Amino acid sequence: GNSVTQMEGPVTLSEEAFLTINCTYTATGYPSLFWYVQYPGEGLQLLLKATKADDKGSNKGFEATYRKETTSFHLEKGSVQVSDSAVYFCALLFMNTGFQKLVFGTGTRLLVSP
Amino acid sequence: DGGITQSPKYLFRKEGQNVTLSCEQNLNHDAMYWYRQDPGQGLRLIYYSQIVNDFQKGDIAEGYSVSREKKESFPLTVTSAQKNPTAFYLCASSIQGRQPQHFGDGTRLSIL
């Protein structure tokens, strides 16, 4: 089946530290991969995406590379800010009998202190 | 600005009562979705609709119902048959095909 596994949180960092949030997936076929971010009390916002192997998605200083050989899509940022504190969801999208289905990981909470 | 509007932001339900959550989009998207989010868990798909007047059950449809009479609107009713309705409900929409879904800000439902 199709599934996503994320590292457990919370991840606690000081401002300007390097961030890695691990995400691995199991999928049949060729899924697209996404990172979504959720700020407290809000919905999910698309952070970045990659649609095929070796694609790199990037946005707001965050990056993730679609690695087919390791079935991974780890999220990285070189220097985090307090405003990056949120819950991050890795997700894969595949086509299921003509409609797109998103499968989410359980989310990783990031806490950044000044 | 185009987007998805969910209302109300907070909703309280008495035991045995049905409640309806609103979801409206002005993105001209064909497909719409309802998800449930519980603490510490990912999102689970309740219902989805690819086109007006058509919708399909997702992974956890029991105790819920939907309608899709207009392209812009996809309301979710939480019925009294849903025994554990307390959760955060998120509506999303997308263009057909391998395109990302766009989410509303959610409705938090609680039982009185």
Image (cartoon, helix red, strand yellow):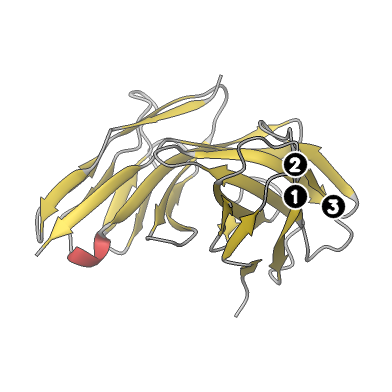
> Label 3 belongs to which residue?
B67
Type of residue at label 1?
Gln
Label 3 chain ID:
B
Q: Secondary structure at mark 1?
A: loop
Pointer 1 and pointer 3 on the same chain? yes
User: Percent position (x, y) of residue A68?
Assistant: 40, 28
3D distance between C-alphas at marks 3 and 2: 17 Å
Residue extending furthest bottom?
B1
Q: Secondary structure at mark 2?
A: loop
Counting other residues with Cα less than 10 Å from the Cα at mark 2, is it few (<14), some (14-19), or many (20 or more)?
some
Q: Secondary structure at mark 3?
A: loop
Q: Residue at point 19% right, 64% down?
A: A82
User: Percent position (x, y) of residue B95?
Assistant: 69, 56
3D distance between C-alphas at marks 1 and 3: 19 Å
Label 1 chain ID:
B
Q: Answer with mark 3 or mark 2, whichever residue precedes in sequence.
A: 3
Q: Residue at point 74% right, 67% down?
A: B28
Mark 1 touches mark 2? (CB < 8 Å):
yes
The quarter of the rendered structure image containing the N terminus of chain B is bottom right
Q: Is residue A13 left or right of residue B66?
A: left
Residue B107's place in the image compared with B18, above or below, is below
Residues B97 and B91: in front is B91
Residue A32's place in the image compared with A30, above or below, is below
Q: Which mark, by number, is residue B80? A: 2
Q: Residue at point 57% right, 25% down?
A: A29
Mark 1 touches mark 3? (CB < 8 Å):
no
Q: Which mark, by number, is residue B17? A: 1
Q: Nearer the viewer, mark 1 or mark 3?
A: 1
User: Percent position (x, y) of residue B14?
Assistant: 67, 51
Type of residue at label 2?
Ser
Evaluate whether residue B108 shows in this view: yes
Q: Answer with mark 1 or mark 3, whichever residue precedes in sequence.
A: 1
